[in-house]
Image (cartoon, rainbow, N blue to C red):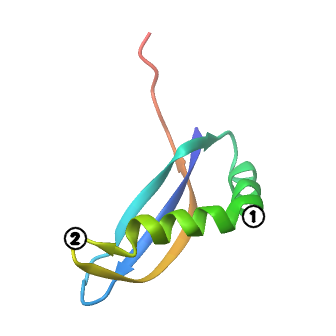
Amino acid sequence: MIWALSIMLWYVDEPKQDIQYWQHQTFESQWECQEYLAKNKLPIVDSILETFRNKDGKLLQNFEFYCEGKSYVMDV
């Protein structure tokens, strides 16, 4: 299993949340993901606001971070 940092985004007047994955890095454990987030939160927040503050005319209302476990199968 790998862990990915996901960001749930809420937009004004949009009933459904949008989930984005922080593609810059994956992690071997949930702890490693949480530690990365704790050490890098400010630049991550800056990037989120720059990229998603106004997406396709929708205004960002709120966002939340999650470290999400992903299972994968390797083709041999």
Which one is in front in this view, the residue at disc 1 or the one at disc 2? Answer: 2
Picture coordinates of residue 22 (x, y %)? 51, 52
Q: Residue furthest front?
A: 50
Marks 1 and 2, Cα distance to the nearest angstrom? Answer: 30 Å
In this view, the residue in front, 54 or 20, is: 54
Q: Residue at x 74, y 49 (%)?
A: 32
Kind of residue sitting beneath label 1: Ala
How crowded pointer 1 is (Cα within 10 Å; few <14, some 14-19, many 20+) is rated as few
Asked which secondary structure carries label 1, the reply is helix
User: Residue placed at 46% from the left, 21% from the top?
Assistant: 74
Q: Please name whichever residue, 44 or 73, is drawn nearer the observer in this view of the structure.
A: 44
Mark 1 vs 2: CB contact within 8 A: no
Foreground residue, 12 or 73? 12
Residue topped by disc 1: 38
Q: Identify the residue at the far bottom of this view.
A: 13
| Farthest top residue in view | 76
Q: Residues within 10 Å of mark 2 (few under 14, many from 20)?
A: few
Asked if 2 appears above or below 12 in the picture, the reply is above
Please tell me whether mark 2 sits on a helix, a strand or a loop.
loop
Identify which residue is drawn at 68% across, 39% down: 28
Q: Is residue 7 above or below residue 2?
A: below
Q: Position of residue 43 (x, y in %)?
A: 64, 62
Q: Amino acid at mark 2?
A: Asp
Specify the quadrant of the image occupied by residue 26. Answer: top right
Q: Is residue 65 left or right of residue 42?
A: left
Q: Residue beneath label 2, please?
A: 56
In the rendered image of this protein, does residue 32 appear above or below residue 40? Answer: above
The x, y position of residue 30, in whole percent, is 68, 52
